[in-house]
Amino acid sequence: MDIFKALTKIPRQVIYVVIALGVIIPLLKPIGLPIRVMPKSRQLFAAIDSLGPRSKPVLISVDFDPQSMPELYPMLVAVLRHCFARDIKVIIMALWPQGPGLAEMALDVIPKEFDKEYGRDFAFLGYKFGVTAILLGMGDNIKNVFPVDYHGTPLDSIEITAHLQNYDDLSVVITLSAGDPGWRAWLLYAQARYSARVGIGVTAVSAADVYPYVETGQVIGLLAGMKGASEYEILVHEHGYSEGKRAAVQGMDAQSLGHLVIMVFIIIGNIGYFVMRRKK
C-alpha cells in the first residue's frame, strides 16, 4: 500500500491508544512543559503577596463542586499554600452545598504542611443557603450570618474571628467559582455595595466574562481555568513558598501533550489526503 494512502487510513484504535498515552504519561511523570504566567494571575498573586502576618484575614469562598475540581481545586490549594507561607490568616466559607466537603479536603492537608493551627491561623465558616441575604448580611455583621463556625463553635470564642465585623475586616475576598452563585454575586454585593477587594478564580469557559471587570479594577486578579491554577502554582513555587505537588502543572502537561498528539494526527492525515488527491 502506498505510504500516503496509509496515512489516511490509520486505525482509530491506534489513534486512541497514542492519545491515551500522551495524556497518562505526564500525569505519572511530569514533563515540565513551559507555562507563561499571564498578567491577571500575577495581579492576584501580587495582591496576596503584599500581605503579611499583621494583615487582615483573607476570605476564600469555595463556590464549586466536584465536577469542577480539576480546574478550581488546585487554585484553592495554591492560594492556601501562599497565604500560610506568608503567615496570612485565612477564613473559608462556601456558597455551594458541595463546597464544605472540598474545603475540608484541602484543610485536612495544607495547614499541616505549614504547622498551622485551627482558630489561630485559619477558620472554616461552612455553607449557608441564601446568597443575597448572606453577602449583604456579611457587609453589616458577619457574625449575624455565621454565629458559629462549621464545627458549631461560636465565632466570638475563636481567635481569628473574635474581632471580625464585616468586609472592612478582610484584606481580600477570593471566590473560586464554577457558576451561579459565584463571582457575579460577590461582585454585585461585596464589591459594588461594600467595596470589598475581590479576586476571582473561574473555569476556563467563564474567564472571558470576568475580563472586563479586571480591566475596570473591580477585580484585583483572575485565575482562568487549569492554566490559571498552574500559573499560580508556578509563582508559589518560584518564590520558594512551597515544594508541594503541583496538580495543575501536571494537568497542563497532560492537556498540552494530548492536544499536540491530536494536532500531529490531523497534520499526518491531511498530508496523506492532499498527496493522494494530487496523484489522482
Image (cartoon, rainbow, N blue to C red):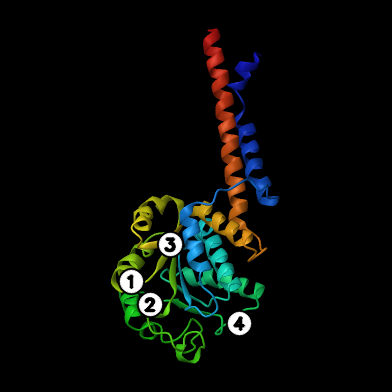
Q: Residue at 54%, 75% (x, y): give it.
A: 52
Q: Residue furthest bottom?
A: 157
Residue 155, position as x, y percentages in the image: 46, 87
Q: Residue at 55%, 71% (x, y): give it.
A: 83
Alpha carbon distance from label 4 to label 3? 26 Å
Residue 95, position as x, y percentages in the image: 41, 70
Q: Residue at 56%, 33% (x, y): give it.
A: 263
- Does the residue at mark 4 contact the one at mark 1 (Cβ under 8 Å)? no
Of the two numbered discs 1 and 2 on the same chain, state the one appearing first in sequence.
Answer: 2
Q: Which mark is residue 167?
A: 2
| Tag 4: amino acid | Glu
Residue beneath disc 3: 200
Of the two numbered discs 1 and 3 on the same chain, state the one appearing first in sequence.
Answer: 1
| Tag 2: amino acid | Tyr
Q: Which mark is residue 267?
A: none
SS at circle 4: loop
